[in-house]
Amino acid sequence: MSPSRLGSAGSPPLYRVILAASIGNTLEWFDFLIYGYFAVTISKLFFPTGNETVSLLLTLGTFGASYLMRPLGAIVIGAFTDRTGRKAGLTLSILLMMIGTTMTAVTPTYATIGIAAPIIILFARLLQGFSVGGEFGSAVAFVVEQSKGRKGFAASWQWASQGVTALLASAFGVLLTGVLPPDQLLAWGWRVPFFFGLLIGPVGLYIRRRMVETPEFTAVKPTGTPVRDLLRRYPGRVLLALGASIISNGSNYLILYIPTYAVKQLGLPQATGFTATMVGAAILAAVSPLSGHWSDKVGRSGIMLAMAWLFLITAYPVFYFMVAYPSLATAIFAASWLSLVKAGYSGVLPSLMSELFPTETRGVGVSLSYSISVTIFGGFAPFVATWLIAVTGDSLSPSFYLMFTAGLSIIALMVVRQWESRGELGRPATVAEAT
């Protein structure tokens, strides 16, 4: 199953395709995860209000606000990708990411420049939200169009790379919170991983500038109006792709929320949450390709439905276990289980979404449906979880959000499974199916 042996004659080896498609994903997720993991620290430095809960809500709200730009980025960059090529779209997105990461790394704190500090941080998050809005769809289109019969395996590396990135980000969290005293962490320690993330950008830019355009894209004639064509011909498929990605995004950002949850609700040391997510990230990285590989053999929707039902059934017991027995062991168990189920689901998701759209609108179709889903159900998940706990006083309330998002994806997948059983995925829709 080695990706180095999957390239076909006349095409680049698949490991190069996977690397080129995943490098921007790596930069995106490293930056976003570090921001989320250090939300408590950032809230003190950039959003001081005198009320810790309000400061944290402002920090997480800024984190979520970046997702408001994702649909716009999906439309602009996704359409650009479908008009000019996968290479051009992926190069543009990583350039914009680098700018946003740099701004976050170097911005002085509120104590130094006052209100300008949170404004700059907000602008940096919005710029990154715009850039990554088109990243996922462009990268998925690029990799599935180079992989022929191994689309599930190849596309699964979009999530496997996120697991590797989360593992690295969690390791930074464990190291910095374990080695540095609180005053040094506040003074400069939290910036170290952001500067480290900047090293990824130039490497990714170099790799993407040397990419070869996909055969599928070069074989078709771009329409010039991919957004209009998508919304006019395939609105139903956009809704199904959106629905299928809901639980993937909801679960992803609640796992990201665990370090904050461990500190605020369980009273555990900050390093505990980072350790738990680090173990979960390793599981995500290892299991996602296996799930994608399996889907190439048995189909996509059956695996995803099984995982969605597991989310629905086990979300409450997992959170109950953490609250009833707060410890490093229970935090690791929760993050590990949720990451295992998520890997089974999300490792299949990119290839399924790509098969819902034809080549001419694949970039914008995958980007837009995914971006709307992540904006509504993903980016604001930590904010919603914090708000639910504050309003209800129930520390188990985040589990209900996870169950709700699982139910929505189950509904979408039941429809997708019917299409899959009739052999309607992976080909353009008829007029009746499109509407």
Image: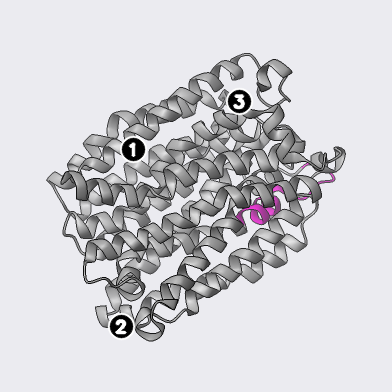
Looking at numbered disc 3 in the image, what kind of residue is underneath it? Gly
Magenta span contains residue 15: yes
Q: Residue at x 38, y 60 (%)?
A: 36
Q: Main secondary structure of the magenta part?
A: helix
In this picture, residue 274 sits left or right of residue 75: left
Work out whether residue 300 or residue 7 is closer to the camera in this orientation and state it: 300
Residue at position x 43%, y 54% from top? 64
- On the image, numbered disc 1 is attached to which residue? 402
Quadrant of the rendering where the N terminus is positioned: top right
Q: Left or right of 399: which side holds 196?
A: right
Residue 259's place in the image compared with 179, above or below, is: above
Whole-percent x and y of residue 146? 74, 43
Give the CA distance from mark 2 to mark 1. 36 Å
Nearer to us of marks 2 and 1 is 1
Between the residue at mark 3 and the residue at mark 2, the CA separation in whole angstroms equals: 52 Å
Residue 184, numbered label: 2
x, y percent for residue 419: 60, 18
Residue 128: image x %, image y %? 55, 61
Amino acid type for the residue under numbered disc 2: Gln
Q: Quadrant of residue 405?
A: top left
What is the magenta range? 8-22
Q: Please report whichever mark, 3 or 2, sits nearer to the chain's N-terminal start.
A: 2
Residue farthest bottom in this picture: 112
Q: CA distance from mark 3 to mark 1?
A: 24 Å
Q: Is residue 40 above or below residue 189?
A: above
Q: Which residue is mark 3?
A: 236
Q: Can you say whether 133 is above or below 350 in the image?
A: below
Residue 65 occupies quadrant: bottom left
Residue 206 coordinates in the image, percent (x, y)? 71, 67
Q: Is residue 214 left or right of residue 107?
A: right
Residue 269 visible to an observer of this rendering: yes
